[in-house]
Amino acid sequence: MSTVQGVGTRFCGWTHHEDGTSHATQWFVLFFLPLVPLRRYHLRVLTDFTATEPFLSVSEQGFFAGYPIGRQVDYYQILERTALAWPEVARTIAWTYLGGPILMAWPISFLVGLGWLWRRHPEWNAESWPLYLFAVLFAAALGNAIAVPLIALRRTRGFRGGLFE
C-alpha cells in the first residue's frame, strides 16, 4: 500500500482499540482524497510517530533525483482481513467531503461577513479594532487551511493524536 503524490492506496476510517490494535479501511485515493473502499483490516500500527519524520523526503534516484517528493513509509502488522464496515465508509466520506472542508472554510465566512459589515459601517474606517479583528480572523483562516489537512493526513497514517502531539 502506497501513494505517489497522493495517488494510490491508503488507510482511512481508523477505529483504535484499547489493546493497541486498530481497524482501518484501505481506500484507493486520488490527491489524498478517498474514492473507493477496497478492503478492511484489523491491524497494529508499528510506525514510531515520536521519531522525527519529515512530511517530504528526498528521492535519491530516478527522474526526481535530489528533489523532495511526497513520500512516507509507515509500518503495519496485518492481523486479519475483515468485512467492510459501511457506517465507517459513510463517516469517512462525510468527513472528507463535508466536515473537513467546513472546518477549513469557516474562518473565511467570518472574513466575508466582516468585509460586509465594514462596508455597511463606514465610520469603522477611523477605528483600529476592525483591522485587528480582520488580522486575527485571517490568521485563523490560514491556520485552519493548513492544520486541518495535516491532521487528516497524519490520522490516515494511524496516528492517534493531533497535529502537535
Image (cartoon, rainbow, N blue to C red):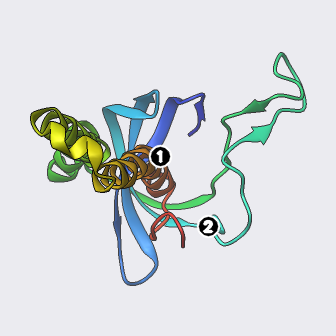
Residue type at mark 2 is Leu
x, y percent for residue 27: 39, 37
C-alpha separation, residue under disc 1 versus residue under disc 2: 27 Å
Q: Which residue is mark 2?
A: 46
Q: Nearer the viewer, residue 115 or 17?
A: 115
x, y percent for residue 77: 57, 62
Q: Is residue 97 left or right of residue 159?
A: left
The numbered dot on residue 146 is: 1
State the residue at coordinates (22%, 36%). Answer: 115
Q: Nearer the viewer, residue 73 or 134?
A: 134
Residue 56 visible in the picture:
yes
Q: Is residue 53 above or below residue 46?
A: above
Residue 133 found in image quarter: bottom left
Q: Is residue 164 above or below residue 142?
A: below
x, y percent for residue 79: 47, 64
Q: Is residue 104 above or below residue 158?
A: above
Q: Nearer the viewer, residue 141 or 88?
A: 141
The tag earlier along the polypeptide, 1 or 2, is 2
Marks 1/2 in contact by CB < 8 Å: the verdict is no
Question: Which quarter of the rendering shows the C terminus?
Answer: bottom right
In the structure shown, which secondary structural element does the residue marked by tag 1 occupy? helix
The mark lying in front, picked from 1 and 2, is: 1
State the residue at coordinates (14%, 52%). Answer: 87
